[in-house]
Image: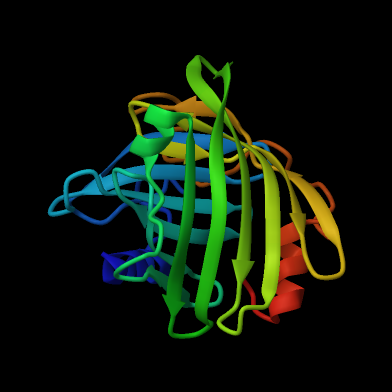
Amino acid sequence: MLTLLMAIGLTAKPVFGQSADTFTLPSGCWAWVTVQAADCTVEHNFVCEGDPDGHKQRVILDEEGMVYLGTTDDESQWLNSFHPRSAHSEQLEPEPRDRASFTELLENGVDTYDFRTISPELGVTRFVGQDTLTGRTVVIDGVALEETQFNITAYNQDGDEIWSSEGNEYIHRDWRIFQAGPSTVTLPDESYQEDDSPVEYMFPGDPGFLSVNPKHGCGLTMSNSPVTALEEFLNVDL
């Protein structure tokens, strides 16, 4: 699947014969929801023929194009990801110390995790954190989501902290996915707030489904963005 993700990242483009505003997926893949977020991004969630049961793919675009492609499983584990602008990839280690578990979060209201990702370009990164259901349900554009509180810290292969983040996210029980929310990202010398919350949901047949154009929060100054600061810290275009 990582090969497929990289192929999408390197070759996907609007279908000018149909609509310059429509994102096209490879043959054998089909999207089931498009999400317009508050941070000037739009994401498309899709599945492909031959995927293991429960695996889901996600592509995120900003005003300049694709910024992320990734795969999760039915437990919402990050299995692999690809960042088109830097052409770097990451893959979950074979035997994590403490796997992320969507099932445990639903059953117990809290889930801890401790796993590493392996990147040929960036090396090994360890992620340690926790998700907790707050008991609060929010409805965004007609979609009911359950709020979580989270904290996560990323360490490099030498054990040094790279960044940490805490805040709120949302889950959809039936889709078994997380959606971003308001959070604070802390780097070694500074911290920033961001809000990647969903604003609109589009389904097959809806206007804006598979749009390549983000709608919300665009045109704002990005210099204070945690992503921009993280790019500078890592000296890599994420």
Q: How many marks?
A: 0
Q: Residue furthest left?
A: 50
Residue at coordinates 38% horizontally, 52% vertically from top-left?
A: 77
Q: Does the image show residue 21?
A: no
Residue at coordinates 41% horizontally, 66% vertically from top-left?
A: 9
- The front one of 80 and 61 is 80
Residue 17 % position (x, y): 35, 50
Q: How is the image coloured?
A: rainbow
**In this rendering, is residue 173 above or below 40?**
above
- The front one of 35 and 171 is 171
Screen quadrant of the C terminus: bottom right
Q: Quadrant of residue 233?
A: bottom right
Q: On the rendered structure, is 211 left or right of 72?
A: right
Screen quadrant of the N terminus: bottom left
Q: Quadrant of residue 207?
A: top left
Q: On the rendered structure, is 185 left or right of 196?
A: right
**In this rendering, is residue 141 above or below 196?**
above
- The front one of 30 and 145 is 145
Q: On the rendered structure, is 149 left or right of 97?
A: right
Residue at coordinates 61% horizontally, 54% vertically from top-left?
A: 152
Residue 46 % position (x, y): 32, 44
Residue 129 % position (x, y): 57, 53
**In this rendering, is residue 55 above or below 200?**
below
Q: Does the image show residue 98?
A: yes
